[in-house]
Image (cartoon, rainbow, N blue to C red):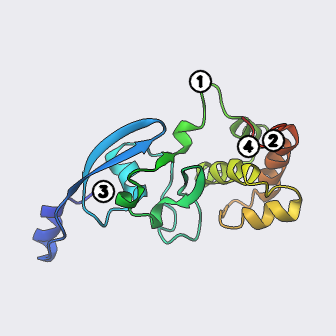
């Protein structure tokens, strides 16, 4: 549940900084929202733009459930201030499928039953696509190392790795599967 600034001030007696307009480019669309400067990118996406695919897991940057791309590079949205994302292209799991067609990594996760409970899946898929683009999926050890920031409480790692290997092996141009 989101608590607005006036409610929080009434409860705590402490007022935060004033909201400022922030322009965010997300999945090819531009949004201007009023945010306090301390709002994380994750909270801006989920609570202000209704893009709830990225999950709030630990909210400390250790589980990877909130992984999104900023200019094509993986970032933890819970540790990124929304206002620092201004001027950058943000991509979320909602922007991965195109024209109603799943990204090959999304399909591979389904085919290999790699999503188990599904909570960490959006962050896992965002990292999995990025690690192939980064050229970090050459060996199983590479995959394990470069996916180590994404935790799966269901222990679906063998299935996740199988999905990544399938997309890597079918990826002719190193673009992460598409």
Can you tell which of label 4 and label 2 is closer to the viewer? 4
Q: What residue is shown at x 80% (from left), y 38% (from top)?
A: 173
Of the 4 image quadrants, the one containing the N terminus is: bottom left
Contact between labelled residues 2 and 4, with CB atoms less than 8 Å apart: yes
Of the 4 image quadrants, the one containing the C terminus is: top right
Question: Which residue does the numbered mark 3 point to in the structure image?
Answer: 1
Residue that protrudes farthest toward the top in the picture: 99
Q: Work out how far the residue at label 4 is from the one at label 3, CA to CA, in angstroms.
A: 36 Å
Question: Which residue does the numbered mark 2 point to in the structure image?
Answer: 167
Residue 28 is situated, as x and y percent measured from the top left of the image, at: 47, 35
The numbered mark, 2 or 1, whose residue comes first in the sequence reads 1
Circle 2 sits in a helix, a strand or a loop, which is it?
helix
Can you tell which of label 2 and label 3 is closer to the viewer? 2
Residue that protrudes farthest toward the front in the picture: 87
Question: Which residue does the numbered mark 4 point to in the structure image?
Answer: 176
Q: Work out how far the residue at label 4 is from the one at label 1, CA to CA, in angstroms.
A: 18 Å
Circle 1 sits in a helix, a strand or a loop, which is it?
loop
Residue 101 is situated, as x and y percent measured from the top left of the image, at: 64, 25
Can you tell which of label 4 and label 1 is closer to the viewer? 4
Can you tell which of label 4 and label 3 is closer to the viewer? 4
The numbered mark, 2 or 3, whose residue comes first in the sequence reads 3
Question: Which residue does the numbered mark 1 point to in the structure image?
Answer: 100
């Amino acid at each position: 549940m989101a608590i607005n600034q006036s409610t929080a001030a009434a409860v705590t007696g402490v007022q935060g900084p004033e909201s400022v307009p922030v322009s965010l480019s997300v999945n090819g669309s531009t949004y201007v929202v009023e945010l306090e400067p301390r709002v994380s990118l994750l909270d801006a996406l989920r609570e202000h733009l209704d893009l709830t695919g990225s999950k709030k897991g630990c909210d400390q940057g250790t589980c990877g459930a909130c992984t999104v791309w900023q200019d094509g590079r993986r970032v933890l949205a819970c540790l990124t201030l929304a206002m620092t994302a201004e001027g950058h292209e943000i991509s979320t799991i909602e922007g991965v499928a195109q024209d109603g067609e799943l990204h090959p990594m999304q399909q591979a996760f389904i085919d290999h039953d790699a999503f188990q409970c599904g909570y960490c899946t959006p962050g896992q898929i965002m990292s999995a696509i990025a690690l192939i683009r980064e050229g970090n999926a050459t060996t199983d050890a590479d995959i394990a190392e470069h996916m180590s920031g994404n935790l799966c409480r269901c222990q679906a790692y063998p299935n996740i790795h199988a999905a990544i290997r399938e997309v890597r092996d079918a990826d002719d141009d190193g673009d992460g599967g598409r």
